[in-house]
Image (tube, rainbow, N blue to C red):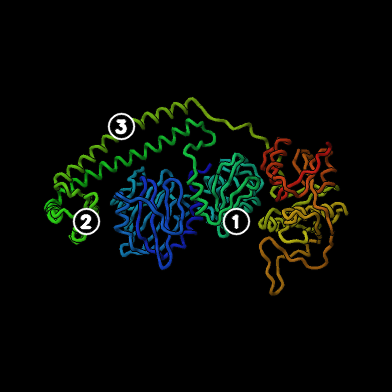
C-alpha cells in the first residue's frame, strides 16, 4: 500500500500546478507541523495547494478552510514574505521528490517542499535559507536558518539517460533487473516492476543478462512513461478486499487484472486516497509490530526535532526582547495606555497604526510585533515586557524538559526495534508460484499454430512498432484485423504456412482487437507480405504511432468466430501457458479452457488459471485478451 509520493507522482502533480502560475498567494496555513496549505487567487479564480509532508501534495479548486486562531511562527513567516506575491514558477528538482515554488518578489523568494523521508519546507531568499520548518543536519548537508540552501545529492533522471548511458548502468549492475531499474535508473518500485512486465522479463533476472535489443526496448518503455503523463488517466487501485492500495497518474499494464476507480483529475484522486490512508500500514516483508515501531520511531524523531527547534526559538525570542528592550517597552506601554479605556475592539485599529505592529487579537490580548531580524514575537498586552520575556524562557524550558523525555522514549523504541530485527521476526508471503521459462517472444503476444508456426503480436503501439521494425523479415507474413485498435501480427516464416495457420493468425488478430471488449461474435482480418507494410505515408496522410500503411492487395478472411482457448503446453521442451485459437491449442493438448467475450471478470478467470497451472498471475495476464470473458467449456470435462 502506497504511503508516500513517488517521483512520478511529483512529476504528474507539477503538471497540474502549472494552472496556478500567475495567481497571487493570499494566506498560508500550517496544520500540526506536518501539513501546509496556501490559498491562491486571481481574476475569477481561487485555488488551494496542500502539502502533506512525507506523503503527498495536491491542488483544490476554491479556498480550503481551516481554524486559524493561533498560526504557528513558520506560517506567519510565509505570510510576511510571500502573501500578495504571484506564483511565478513551479518545478520539480531533477527527478527527485522536491518541488520548488518560485514567487514573483524583488528578493527572489522560493518555497522548497521536500517530500522524501518525513519531509520538510524551506523558505529561501536567493540561495540563503530564511527559515526551515524543521532544522536538520546531515554529514554533507545542513538545513538551518542563515545557511546556503543545498539540494541533496541528485538521483538519476531515467528520462535523460540515452541508450549508451542506460546500457552502461545495466551492464555494470550486480543487482537483479527490478532493483537495478528501481534504484540505479531511479524508476522506483512500481515503475521498475512495470518495465519488467512490459519487457517480458522476471523481476529477479540479473540485470546484466538482458540483451542489447532488450535494453533498447527498455529505453522505449521508460520514455513511454513520460508520454503517458501527458495524457493522464488518474485512478485509485482497489484490491480484492475492497481496500485502496495505490493512486496513480496513469494506468500500468501489470494492474490490468485489478479493480480501478477512475477519477477525472490526479489531485482529486490523491486527496481521496491519502484522506482514507490507514494509520497502520504494514510494509511487505515486515511484521505488523515492526512496522508499528518504525512509524513510532519516525514520529518520535520528528517530535524531538520540533522540541529542539522550540527550545531554541523561545530562548532566542526571550533574548531578543531584552536586546530591543527600550523600543519594545515603549511600544507595549503605549498600547496598554490606549487599551486603558477598556474597549479593546475599538482600540484595535489605532494599535495597528503603531510602528512594528503586525497584528492585534483583542479576544486573546495578543500583540504580534516585528523584530529587528525579521522574526515575529507574540506579546501578551496584559503583562509587562519582563513578564513576556519570562514567558518565552518558560516555554523554552518546558520544551527542553519535554525533549529529555522524548529522547528517553526514542532510545527505548530503538532498542525494541533492534531486538525485534535481531530475532528475525518477519511476516512471510505465501510460497511464490514459479514462472515458466522465458523466450524472446514473451515480450509480445504469441501462440504456436496447429501447423507449428510461431505467431507473434504487439501488445500496444510501442510493441507494434518494435515487432514490425525488428522482427518482420522476408519470408514472414503480416496480419491485421480489419478494425481500429488491433495489434500487428507476424507469422514467422509464414510464406510456408498453410490455410490453417493463416486463418488462426487472423482469428488471433480479431480476438485481440477492440472487438473483444465490444463483445462481438465475429470479425474480419487480412494478411499481406512484408514489402506491402510501410511506415512512410502518402502525401497528405498521417501515420500514428503503432500504425502502418498497407499497399497492394489484402488477402481477407471474413466472419471469423471470436473464440479462444488457453492451456499449459510444451514449447521447445518447456511448459508454457499459451492462449490462442482453439485449433492451435487443441493441436498441442487435450486439456484446455474454452472462452469467448462475456461478463465474467477477467481477473477471476486469471486467478483460476494461475491456481490451476501454478504460475504467477502476471503470466496469465499477459496471455489473455483485454476484456472480460465467458468460459464456455473445460475440455476434457
Among the 4 quarters of the image, the one containing residue 21? bottom left
Mark 2 / mark 1, whichever is N-terminal? 1
Q: Is residue 354 above or below residue 536?
A: above
The spot of residue 377 in percent (x, y) is: 22, 50
User: To which residue does mark 2 refer?
Assistant: 345
User: To which residue does mark 1 refer?
Assistant: 224
In depth, the one of 443 and 266 nearer the eye is 266
Q: Is residue 610 left or right of residue 195?
A: right
The mark lying in front, picked from 2 and 3, is: 2
Q: Are marks 2 and 1 in contact (CB under 8 Å)?
A: no
Give SS at disc 2: helix
The spot of residue 133 in percent (x, y) is: 34, 48
In depth, the one of 592 and 471 nearer the eye is 592
In depth, the one of 51 and 417 nearer the eye is 51
Give the numbered dot on residue 405.
Answer: 3
The residue positioned 53% from the left and 41% from the top of the image is: 1
Amino acid at each position: 500500500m502506497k504511503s508516500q509520493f513517488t517521483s512520478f507522482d511529483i512529476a504528474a502533480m507539477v503538471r497540474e500546478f502549472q494552472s496556478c502560475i500567475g495567481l497571487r498567494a493570499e494566506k498560508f496555513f500550517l496544520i500540526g507541523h506536518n501539513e501546509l496549505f496556501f490559498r491562491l487567487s486571481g481574476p475569477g479564480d481561487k485555488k488551494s495547494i496542500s502539502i502533506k509532508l512525507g506523503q503527498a501534495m495536491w491542488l483544490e479548486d476554491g479556498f480550503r478552510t481551516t481554524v486559524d486562531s493561533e498560526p504557528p511562527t513558520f506560517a506567519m513567516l510565509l505570510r510576511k514574505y510571500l502573501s500578495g506575491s504571484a506564483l511565478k514558477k513551479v518545478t520539480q528538482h531533477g527527478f527527485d521528490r522536491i518541488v520548488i515554488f518560485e514567487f514573483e518578489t524583488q528578493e527572489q523568494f522560493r518555497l522548497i517542499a521536500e517530500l522524501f523521508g518525513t519531509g520538510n519546507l524551506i523558505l529561501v531568499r536567493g540561495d540563503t535559507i530564511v527559515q526551515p520548518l524543521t532544522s536538520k543536519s546531515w554529514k554533507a548537508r545542513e538545513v538551518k536558518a542563515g545557511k546556503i540552501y543545498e539540494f541533496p545529492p541528485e538521483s538519476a533522471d531515467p528520462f535523460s539517460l540515452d541508450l549508451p548511458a542506460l546500457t552502461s548502468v545495466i551492464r555494470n549492475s550486480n543487482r537483479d533487473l527490478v532493483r537495478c531499474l528501481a534504484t540505479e535508473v531511479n524508476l522506483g518500485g512500481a515503475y521498475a516492476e512495470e518495465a519488467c512486465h512490459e519487457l517480458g522479463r522476471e523481476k529477479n533476472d540479473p540485470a546484466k543478462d538482458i540483451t542489447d535489443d532488450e535494453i533498447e526496448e527498455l529505453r522505449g518503455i521508460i520514455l513511454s512513461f513520460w508520454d503517458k503523463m501527458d495524457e493522464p488517466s488518474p485512478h485509485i487501485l482497489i484490491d480484492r478486499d475492497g481496500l485502496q492500495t495505490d493512486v496513480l497518474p496513469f494506468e500500468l499494464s501489470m494492474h490490468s487484472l485489478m479493480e480501478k476507480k477512475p477519477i477525472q483529475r490526479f489531485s482529486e484522486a490523491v486527496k481521496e486516497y491519502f484522506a482514507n490512508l490507514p494509520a497502520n500500514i504494514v510494509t511487505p516483508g515486515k511484521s505488523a509490530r515492526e512496522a508499528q515501531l518504525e512509524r513510532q520511531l519516525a514520529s518520535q524523531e520528528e517530535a524531538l526535532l520540533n522540541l529542539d527547534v522550540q527550545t531554541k526559538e523561545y530562548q532566542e525570542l526571550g533574548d531578543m526582547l531584552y536586546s530591543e528592550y527600550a523600543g519594545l517597552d515603549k511600544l507595549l506601554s503605549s498600547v496598554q495606555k490606549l487599551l486603558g479605556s477598556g474597549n479593546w475592539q475599538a482600540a484595535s485599529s489605532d494599535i495597528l497604526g503603531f510602528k512594528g505592529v503586525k497584528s492585534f487579537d483583542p479576544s486573546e490580548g495578543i500583540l504580534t510585533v516585528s523584530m529587528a531580524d525579521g522574526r515575529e514575537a507574540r506579546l501578551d498586552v496584559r503583562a509587562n515586557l519582563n513578564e513576556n520575556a519570562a514567558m518565552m524562557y518558560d516555554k523554552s524550558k518546558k520544551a527542553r524538559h519535554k525533549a529529555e523525555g522524548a529522547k528517553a522514549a526514542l532510545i527505548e523504541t530503538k532498542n525494541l526495534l533492534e531486538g525485534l530485527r535481531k530475532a528475525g521476526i518477519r511476516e512471510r508471503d505465501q510460497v511464490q508460484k514459479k514462472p515458466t521459462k522465458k523466450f524472446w517472444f514473451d515480450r509480445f503476444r504469441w501462440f504456436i499454430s496447429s501447423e507449428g508456426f510461431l505467431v507473434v503480436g504487439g501488445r500496444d503501439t510501442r510493441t507494434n512498432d518494435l515487432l514490425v521494425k525488428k522482427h518482420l523479415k522476408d519470408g514472414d507474413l503480416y496480419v491485421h484485423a480489419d478494425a481500429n485498435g488491433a495489434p500487428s501480427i507476424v507469422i514467422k516464416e509464414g510464406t510456408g504456412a498453410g490455410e490453417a495457420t493463416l486463418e488462426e493468425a487472423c482469428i488471433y488478430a480479431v480476438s485481440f482487437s477492440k472487438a473483444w471488449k465490444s463483445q462481438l461474435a465475429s470479425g474480419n482480418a487480412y494478411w499481406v507480405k512484408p514489402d506491402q507494410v510501410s511506415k512512410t505515408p502518402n502525401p497528405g496522410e498521417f501515420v500514428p504511432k503503432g500504425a502502418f500503411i498497407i499497399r497492394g492487395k489484402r488477402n481477407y478472411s471474413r466472419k471469423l468466430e471470436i473464440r479462444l482457448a488457453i492451456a499449459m503446453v510444451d514449447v521447445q521442451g518447456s511448459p508454457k501457458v499459451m492462449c490462442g485459437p482453439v485449433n492451435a491449442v487443441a493441436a498441442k493438448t487435450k486439456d484446455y479452457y474454452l472462452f469467448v467475450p462475456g461478463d465474467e471478470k477477467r481477473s477471476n478467470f486469471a486467478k483460476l488459471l494461475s491456481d490451476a497451472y501454478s504460475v504467477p498471475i502476471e503470466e496469465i495476464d499477459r496471455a489473455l485478451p483485454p476484456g472480460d470473458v465467458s468460459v464456455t467449456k473445460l475440455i476434457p470435462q
